[in-house]
Image (cartoon, helix red, strand yellow):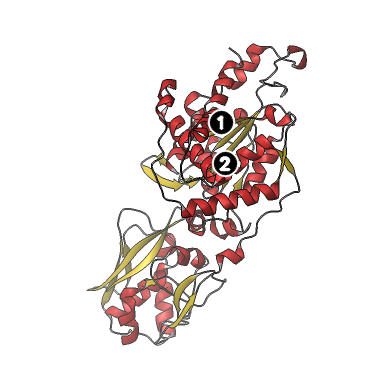
Amino acid sequence: MTIKTLFQQNGKIEPGFVDVKLLPGIPQLHIVGLPDASIRECGIKLKSAMRSLGLEWPTGQQIVVSLRPMDFRKGGSGAELAIALAYLAVTGQLSEPMREALPGLIVYGEVTLGGEVFAPADLAQVMQAATSPVLTGTLQSPVREGRWLEIKTLHQLVPERKHQIFDWPAYWRRPAVPKLELHESAARHLMLALHMKLNVLLAGPQGSGKTTWARLLHSLSDPPDSLRLVESAQYFGDEIFESAWRPLEQPHHTITPQAMIGGGLPLEPGVITRAHGGVLIMDEFLHFHPQVLEALREPIESGFIDLARKGTREKFPADFQLIATTNLCPCGKLNPAAIKKEDCNYNLIRCKSTTMRLSGPLLDRFDLLSLTHEWLKRGEKVSLPEVVDRVAEARDFARSRTEEPEELPEWTEDFALSHRRRRSMARVARGLADLEGSEKIYGRHTQEAFALVVTPMHKLREIFA
């Protein structure tokens, strides 16, 4: 008898199967297929449960249990119920309704010495990711969403069917948004980053509002994608849902590469996986360990981090929006628009060494480089409610317009832009058109996109030329 179940592997839920067969020999339970201690030790528990309920335990026969697939070590207490029901089916002690229902179910539950069945503590996480109804025991904690059948003991004949659909839109709680007005340039960047989900590097003097801008982006972002949070919950449990909003990770610049990226044995995810589906804010970006900075390049591009340690390999989700902030000078006063040495305590050579920590390939991963000294100039102010309204209008318009290839005009080829610069420029031009409610991307959109995406990069390189 083959039964579908789920196993734990390094904190991740993996689908699998349980096969049971009886062979002549001493009546013992043998489990093969790389079980861990929690599964290997379930034999005596199941024997006690069977006898407590008056069910037969074999005499003169050994029970052989095979766990599939065979290519990883399997853990978790949820396989106990699958093993028990597979044995009852093989020995003819399973009710006909239950036998008929099993092929379409995922069996996942814990069995007590007395034969009662309980749902494991991670059932909520399992059911959020399950593609079929789950047969389990009495729930010990609430389940947000899922389809499941519940039995109380091993010889309950007909399981009780339950189905719950969680109201995710009503669950989300937007973080408090302060009453602020932004410089028109800061507001423009914020609207584009929110609408197009751009990665942004904020560089400029201290006190120009970089950190405040980054936190505003998280608060004003659109509601979370529950499927992405479910992916993270496989590794971090229900704490991912506690904020009732998108994940926000703000690691200190002294964080180690392993804590940021993940690693160890067994392989564990890091902070960038905790930020999956949310926002990763890296204050004092250029003070992070160089290994941390360079390791961001692949997940920014692909949306996951692929780790390998001593023959073990794991792919963790890491699709986040990166917002980084940095000063351009150790004293934090350097203004690209007016370099005055009497305002700075360091010479230009030392200041240049600060920005040299930002490699060209890493800088290229940012869609926008915002030089925040411009936010200190006099200019029009834009209220946050206006930012919210304009972004909502742009999103509504984007959903209704037709999708067309984002092509750049021929004049942009004269600048020898990298593929990523061109892609970022095309995305920003599309975002500018959406903010205007324009189906077509016009020359003015492309020119402004060039000024936002390419020009600041040149300015940064010219500061210390």
Tell which of 151 and 447 is nearer to you. 447
Residue 194: % across, % down: 58, 45
* Image quarter of the N terminus: bottom left
Q: Residue at x 42, y 27 (%)?
A: 418
Whether tag 2 and tag 1 are in contact, CB under 8 A, the answer is yes
Residue displayed at 54% across by 58% down: 237
Position in image of residue 61 (x %, y %): 26, 76
Type of the residue with mark 2 = Leu
Q: Is residue 441 visible to us here?
A: yes
In the rendered view, would you say 337 is above or below 165?
Answer: above
Q: CA distance from mark 2 to mark 1?
A: 10 Å
Viewer-closest of 461 and 24: 461
Q: Does 67 appear above or below 135?
A: above
| SS type, badge 2 | helix
Tag 1's secondary structure?
Answer: helix
Mark with earlier residue (2, 1): 2
Residue 352: assigned label: none
